[in-house]
Image: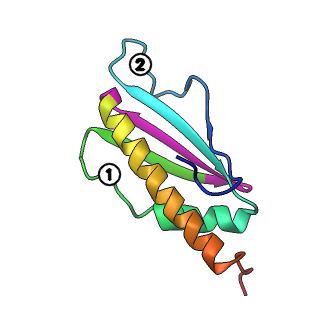
Amino acid sequence: MSIVNSRSVQVAGECTCSCVERAGARQCSRLHVPFPCSREAQIAHDSLSPDAEPRKGGVSKTLSVADNVLHVHWTADEARILRVSVSSFLEHVSLVVQTMDRFGPAQPDS
Protein backbone atom coordinates (compact mmCIF):
# COMPACT_ATOMS: atom_id res chain seq x y z
CA MET A 1 0.00 0.00 0.00
CA SER A 2 1.38 3.35 -0.97
CA ILE A 3 0.74 6.18 1.45
CA VAL A 4 0.57 8.85 -1.26
CA ASN A 5 2.86 9.88 -4.06
CA SER A 6 6.47 10.21 -2.93
CA ARG A 7 6.00 9.97 0.83
CA SER A 8 8.02 7.21 2.39
CA VAL A 9 7.18 5.34 5.56
CA GLN A 10 10.03 3.86 7.52
CA VAL A 11 9.64 0.86 9.78
CA ALA A 12 12.35 0.94 12.39
CA GLY A 13 14.57 -2.06 12.96
CA GLU A 14 14.31 -4.25 16.02
CA CYS A 15 12.62 -2.30 18.76
CA THR A 16 14.87 -1.89 21.77
CA CYS A 17 12.43 -0.02 23.99
CA SER A 18 11.64 -1.03 27.54
CA CYS A 19 8.41 -2.75 26.47
CA VAL A 20 10.28 -5.60 24.80
CA GLU A 21 10.15 -8.76 26.83
CA ARG A 22 12.65 -11.24 25.46
CA ALA A 23 10.46 -14.14 26.56
CA GLY A 24 8.17 -13.24 23.65
CA ALA A 25 5.17 -12.24 25.74
CA ARG A 26 4.84 -8.81 24.06
CA GLN A 27 5.22 -7.72 20.46
CA CYS A 28 6.53 -4.29 19.61
CA SER A 29 6.78 -2.16 16.45
CA ARG A 30 7.77 1.37 15.47
CA LEU A 31 6.83 3.43 12.45
CA HIS A 32 8.23 6.78 11.27
CA VAL A 33 6.21 8.86 8.78
CA PRO A 34 8.05 11.92 7.39
CA PHE A 35 6.08 14.98 6.29
CA PRO A 36 7.18 18.01 4.22
CA CYS A 37 7.06 20.24 7.33
CA SER A 38 6.59 20.01 11.08
CA ARG A 39 3.15 21.68 10.82
CA GLU A 40 1.83 18.85 8.64
CA ALA A 41 3.31 16.24 10.99
CA GLN A 42 1.51 17.94 13.88
CA ILE A 43 -1.76 18.05 11.93
CA ALA A 44 -1.47 14.31 11.25
CA HIS A 45 -0.66 13.66 14.93
CA ASP A 46 -3.67 15.69 16.08
CA SER A 47 -5.94 13.97 13.56
CA LEU A 48 -4.84 10.46 14.49
CA SER A 49 -4.41 10.79 18.27
CA PRO A 50 -8.11 10.62 19.21
CA ASP A 51 -8.41 7.16 17.65
CA ALA A 52 -8.09 4.82 20.61
CA GLU A 53 -7.57 1.13 19.98
CA PRO A 54 -10.97 -0.62 19.96
CA ARG A 55 -9.76 -3.69 21.83
CA LYS A 56 -8.83 -2.91 25.41
CA GLY A 57 -5.82 -4.67 26.89
CA GLY A 58 -4.48 -6.24 23.70
CA VAL A 59 -2.59 -3.38 22.10
CA SER A 60 -1.37 0.11 22.93
CA LYS A 61 -0.23 2.85 20.56
CA THR A 62 1.80 5.98 21.30
CA LEU A 63 2.15 8.87 18.83
CA SER A 64 4.68 11.69 18.96
CA VAL A 65 6.13 14.30 16.63
CA ALA A 66 9.78 15.30 16.29
CA ASP A 67 10.54 17.97 13.70
CA ASN A 68 8.68 16.86 10.57
CA VAL A 69 8.33 13.17 11.48
CA LEU A 70 5.36 11.42 13.04
CA HIS A 71 6.60 8.58 15.28
CA VAL A 72 4.32 5.71 16.24
CA HIS A 73 5.08 2.96 18.72
CA TRP A 74 2.92 -0.10 19.34
CA THR A 75 3.02 -2.86 21.90
CA ALA A 76 0.68 -5.84 21.70
CA ASP A 77 0.06 -9.18 23.32
CA GLU A 78 0.03 -11.03 19.99
CA ALA A 79 1.56 -10.50 16.56
CA ARG A 80 -1.86 -10.82 14.92
CA ILE A 81 -3.30 -7.98 17.01
CA LEU A 82 -0.25 -5.85 16.25
CA ARG A 83 -0.61 -6.48 12.51
CA VAL A 84 -4.28 -5.48 12.50
CA SER A 85 -3.56 -2.29 14.46
CA VAL A 86 -0.67 -1.26 12.19
CA SER A 87 -2.71 -2.01 9.07
CA SER A 88 -5.65 0.04 10.31
CA PHE A 89 -3.35 2.91 11.29
CA LEU A 90 -1.78 2.96 7.81
CA GLU A 91 -5.23 3.27 6.26
CA HIS A 92 -5.96 6.24 8.53
CA VAL A 93 -2.60 7.86 7.74
CA SER A 94 -3.33 7.44 4.04
CA LEU A 95 -6.66 9.23 4.44
CA VAL A 96 -5.07 12.08 6.43
CA VAL A 97 -2.30 12.52 3.83
CA GLN A 98 -4.77 12.47 0.94
CA THR A 99 -6.89 15.09 2.71
CA MET A 100 -3.88 17.35 3.31
CA ASP A 101 -2.77 16.93 -0.31
CA ARG A 102 -6.27 17.77 -1.53
CA PHE A 103 -6.51 20.99 0.49
CA GLY A 104 -2.94 22.16 -0.14
CA PRO A 105 -0.01 23.00 2.12
CA ALA A 106 -0.64 23.68 5.79
CA GLN A 107 -1.06 27.34 6.66
CA PRO A 108 1.01 28.72 9.53
CA ASP A 109 -0.77 29.42 12.80
CA SER A 110 -1.91 33.02 13.14
State the residue at coordinates (45%, 58%).
92
Disc 1 marks a residue whose amino acid type is Glu
| Tally of numbered tags | 2
- As for residue 8 lying within the magenta part, the answer is no
What is the quadrant of the C terminus in the image? Answer: bottom right
What's the magenta region? 65-79
The correct choice, above or below, for 83 with respect to 107 in the image is: above
Residue 88: image x %, image y %? 39, 50
Residue at the spot of label 1: 53
Instruction: State which quadrant residue 101 falls in.
Output: bottom right
| Residue annotated with mark 2 | 21
Position of 26 compared to 5: left or right?
left
Circle 2: element type: loop
As rendered, which of 50 and 83 lies closer to the eye? 83
Q: Where is residue 16 shown, x and y percent of the image? A: 56, 24
Q: How far across and how far down the image is residue 15, in percent?
A: 55, 26
Asked whether, in this view, residue 77 is left or right of residue 90, the answer is left
Eyeballing the image, is 42 above or below 89?
below
Report the Cα–Cα distance between label 1 and label 2.
21 Å
Name the disc covering residue 34, or none.
none
Q: Is residue 34 left or right of residue 81?
A: right
Q: Residue at x 50, y 41 (%)?
A: 73
Question: What residue do we see at 52% from left, 51% from top?
Answer: 63
Local packing at callout 1 (Cα closer than 10 Å; few below 14, some 14-19, many 20+) is some
Residue plotted at (53% across, 45% down)? 72
Of the image marks 1 and 2, the number of the one nearer the N terminus: 2
Dot 1 and dot 2 residues touching (CB under 8 Å): no
